[in-house]
Amino acid sequence: MVASALYRPFEEDDFDAVASIVEEAWYQNAPSPEFAQLEAGADLADCLSRATFSQVAITNNTVAGVVLVRAGRSSERWRLRWSERKHALLEQMTAQDPRAVQELFARREHEDAINRSLLAQADLPDEHEIVLLAVSAKAQGYGVGTLLLDAAANCLASRGATGAYLYTDTSCSWKFYEKRKLKRLASYRTPRHERRLLASEYYLYGMDLSD
């Protein structure tokens, strides 16, 4: 599969396909399939609004994976384009299930606080972040994720970065990063009473780009 894969920058027409990968990976427990689709799209739009580099993997004419990187600040036009998309999707979500959106905001607020704490623990500057890495279930195990991660590393190194970081948690395939020699720099264990809303553990991994 990897031998025939095409790797290129994200294009706007890729949005729905990439959002489906995000939905498949993280939004199977949403209140409804329609809400899951909107929530995944809002999440992706938020990631895109912060990204300054993108790469998608195409296999059999289908988007199979994506990586988004933040190195510096995205252009105002790009940021606004995807921020507007995110807010439009959030409005649709609110119209469909306002209570679920309130819970989403509460979860995001908690997770943002956890991530700030992890970054402070690791004593890292708030830059050179791998914002999103996702591979479709059908493409996993063929090296697509590794090549996307390598593309992110090459981008960051070309911009003078000697290191990068990413956030993940126990709802994700976090062992993938350890197999790729990323180092866990900080972690947070969620109190039992908060686990209905949050993952059981959160991690910050670092990538050494100094070689």
Image (cartoon, grey):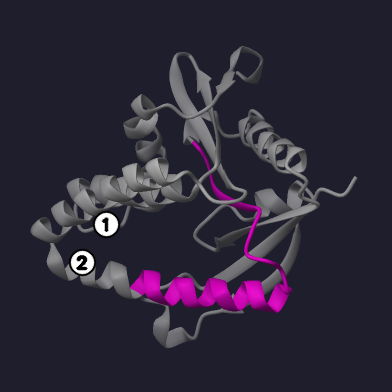
Q: Which residue is mark 1?
A: 30
Which quarter shows the C terminus?
top right
Q: Position of residue 73 (x, y in %)?
A: 54, 51
Q: Amino acid at mark 2?
A: Ala
* Of pointers 1 and 2, the one earlier in the residue sequence: 1
Answer above or below: position of 201 versus 39: below
Residue toward you, 76 or 33: 76
Answer above or below: position of 160 versus 109: above
On screen, residue 81 versus residue 187, left or right, reads: left
Q: Position of residue 82 (x, y in %)?
A: 34, 44
* Crowdedness near tag 2: few (<14), some (14–19) or many (≥20) residues, C-alpha within 10 Å: some
Q: Amino acid at mark 1?
A: Ala
Q: Position of residue 176 (x, y in %)?
A: 67, 48
On screen, residue 16 versus residue 2, left or right, reads: left
Q: Which residue is mark 2?
A: 100
Residue at 51% across, 33% down: 65
Answer above or below: position of 118 versus 160: below
SS of the residue at dot 2?
Answer: helix
* Magenta stretch bounds: 107-135
Magenta-span inclusion, residue 105? no
User: Pointers 1 and 2 in contact (CB under 8 A)?
Assistant: yes
Residue 126, image quadrant: bottom right
